[in-house]
Every structure is written in structure tokens, then in C-alpha cells.
Image (cartoon, rainbow, N blue to C red):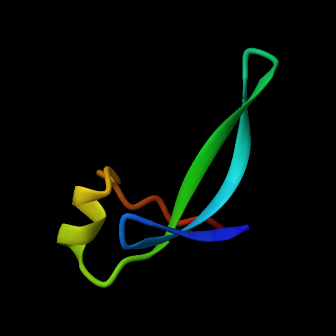
């Protein structure tokens, strides 16, 4: 599901850690890098 989090468009999903599903936000779009950094995204990791 796509949501806006602190001005940044994100996908919500889960990731597996030690056999448990953990919630995660994945960055999709931000109007500028400053907004992305304020939201807590420190690095851009593009997905395939």
C-alpha cells in the first residue's frame, strides 16, 4: 500500500528478521532531498 509519510511517498511492506515479519517503509518519491532527510530516510536504495 502507498502512503504519504512526513511529505514522502512510501510503500508499506514487511521484511523478515530472525523468523519474524517486521513493518517497513520503502521510499518512492520526495519533492526534494531535504524533505526526505527530515522524514528519516538517510540513503536512497533503488529497488529492482
In terms of image quadrants, where is residue 19?
Answer: top right
**Residue found farthest to the right:** 19
Q: In the shown orientation, is residue 31 left or right of residue 17?
A: left
Q: In the shown orientation, is residue 31 left or right of residue 15?
A: left
| Residue drawn at the location 37% of the way across and 73% of the way down | 7
x and y percent of residue 6 in the render?
37, 64
In terms of image quadrants, where is residue 12?
Answer: bottom right
x and y percent of residue 27 in the render?
49, 64
Looking at the figure, which quarter contains the N terminus?
Answer: bottom right
Q: Nearer the viewer, residue 4 or 32?
A: 4
Looking at the figure, which quarter contains the C terminus?
Answer: bottom right
Q: Please determine whether, in this image, residue 44 is positioned above or below residue 19.
A: below
| Residue drawn at the location 59% of the way across and 69% of the way down | 3
| Residue drawn at the location 56% of the way across and 53% of the way down | 25
**Residue found farthest to the left:** 34
Q: In the shown orientation, is residue 8 left or right of residue 15?
A: left
Number of marks: 0
| Residue drawn at the location 61% of the way across and 45% of the way down | 24
Q: Please determine whether, in this image, residue 7 is positioned above or below residue 13.
A: below
In terms of image quadrants, where is residue 39?
Answer: bottom left
x and y percent of residue 41 in the render?
35, 54
x and y percent of residue 9 in the render?
50, 74
**Residue found farthest to the top:** 18
Amino acid at each position: 500500500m502507498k502512503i504519504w509519510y512526513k511529505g514522502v511517498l512510501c510503500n508499506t511492506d514487511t521484511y523478515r528478521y530472525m523468523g519474524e515479519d517486521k513493518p517497513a517503509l520503502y521510499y518512492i518519491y520526495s519533492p526534494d532531498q531535504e524533505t526526505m532527510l527530515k522524514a528519516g530516510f538517510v540513503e536512497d536504495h533503488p529497488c529492482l
